[in-house]
Amino acid sequence: MKILMVTPYPACPGADGGGTVMFNLIRHLAARHEIVYLSFARQEDLERLAQVAPYCAEVVTVPLPGGAGMSALAKGLNLARRVVHNVLSYATLTPVVVRKCQSRAMDEAIRRAVERHKPDAAHLCFPQMAHYIEACAGTPAVMDTLDVALVGVFRRAMNARRVWEKLYYLMQWLFWVRYESRYFPRFGKVLTVTRQDAAALTMAMPDLDVYAEAIAVDAGSQPAPERDRGVRIGFLASFGHPPNTDAALYFAESVLPLVRERMPDALFVVAGRNPPRLLLDLKDKGVTCLGFVDDVSEFYGSVDVVVAPIRYGGGIKIKVLEAMACGKPLVATSVGAEGITEAGEGAFLVADDPAAFAGAVIALLSDKERRAVLGERARQVIERRFSWHRLCDDLDTIYRALDAVKR
């Protein structure tokens, strides 16, 4: 079949969880289908997009205003755009993230691709792209949420400390409910990565046709043998995603000091491009920021325990799946663990308050045998429930069912 894939930012491995998932989805689907790929991209993204090109019949990019720049002028322009997007968000009752992705050029690019390639199905990734269902011009379409906004934004509002911030995100949440309720029912199938996200959507839209657990991850290489390198606690994330910044600062400020009371040489080793300044300033308090790392498996092999102290956001956390695929022992919050393990699997430890989280980390750091057991259980969960073969088989069934209805 011929599949039109549309994403809000480039499908590239390593840069962030969403980009990695979209890249691997295209890579695995390309073995079964012909992929026509469209994405927003900035000038600095074009070189990285070369990685996905071999798997696609065509790659089309549309400029996204507001490329990252470090000059005073670039920063000023980006700030002005943010102000404009927020004003338009409230004027039109539209989520600000959606406003950023509304583009006549993208609309026209999708319509041209549909006319030229006549795809059997369209696969739109992330909720902020749902309005492009109109540009698909009758092509049966799948909405791949990856992160259900009406779940994640509500949690962000509940975790906000300032009254104005809480009110801001509650309003954005209401805009998301309105937006998703308007567009999601127009898709032949809506994909979510957790059953919790699926339940939230069907509660708001009872007639929605939802498929849960639409996520997979490549099994990682076996972790490197533990070496005598001190005590290292790892966290890998994209800091362009606010829940990751919140998680890193929460662990560094509220949990790590409790760990270091028992283990003074413990280090919090953070990988990811553009870590926040507040995190960099904690270097003297046991925080080490590596920046972007090319090899995820090598990073996980260099730490003793991985943490996922995520406090808000929806969907499955790709960083958790990657750590599990590499056989690493892990401690996560309930939000970080959501949708990954079932009762009785015991693949990692879950804790939500700072004292309990620190206690779980200390327990693992103190017990090498338990770390090995949890790491092996984690790999087994990935192999059993998150294989690309399983997901691609299910997507084949979905695409063919949609195509049959069209015919």
Image (tube, helix red, strand yellow):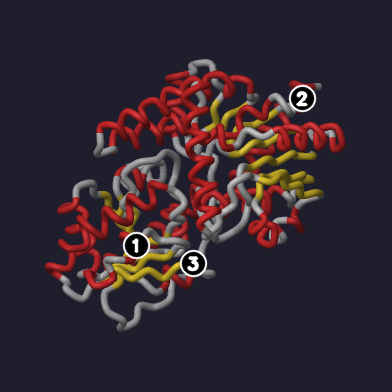
Please provide percent x and percent y for residue 89: 50, 28
Q: Which residue is under mark 3? A: 292
Going by the numbered disc 3, the residue's amino acid type is: Phe
Residue hosting label 1: 306
Q: Which residue lies furthest to the front in this view?
A: 73
How far from the left and from the top, in percent, is residue 287? 29, 68
Q: How crowded is mark 1: few (under 14 residues within 10 Å), some or many (20 or more)?
A: many
Side of 298 where 112 appears, left or right:
right
Front in this rendered view, residue 374 or 151: 151
Verify CB contact (< 8 Å) between mark 3 and mark 1. no
Query: Amino acid under label 2?
Result: Ala
Residue type at the position of mark 1:
Val
Q: What element carries label 3?
A: loop
Labels 1 and 2: the sequence-earlier one = 2
Q: Name the residue under label 2.
A: 137
Residue 394 occupies quadrant: top right
Residue 210 visible, this angle? yes
Q: Which residue lies furthest to the left in this view?
A: 261
Secondary structure beneath dot 1 equals strand
- What is the spatial separation of the Cα atoms under label 1 and label 2, in whole angstroms? 45 Å
Given residues 29 and 41, the one toward you in this image is 41
Residue 368 at least partly seen = no
Residue visible at 60% across and 39% down in the picture: 125
Nearest-to-viewer mark from 1 and 2: 2
Decide: few, some or many residues near mark 2? Use Cα within 10 Å; few <14, some 14-19, many ≥20: few
Task: Return the x and y of residue 247 as percentages of the image width and height.
Answer: 32, 52
Residue 157 location, quadrant: top left
What's the residue at 57%, 37% (across, down)? 100
Q: How crowded is mark 3: few (under 14 residues within 10 Å), some or many (20 or more)?
A: some
**Outermost residue to the top:** 207
Residue at x 31%, y 44% (from the top left corner): 311
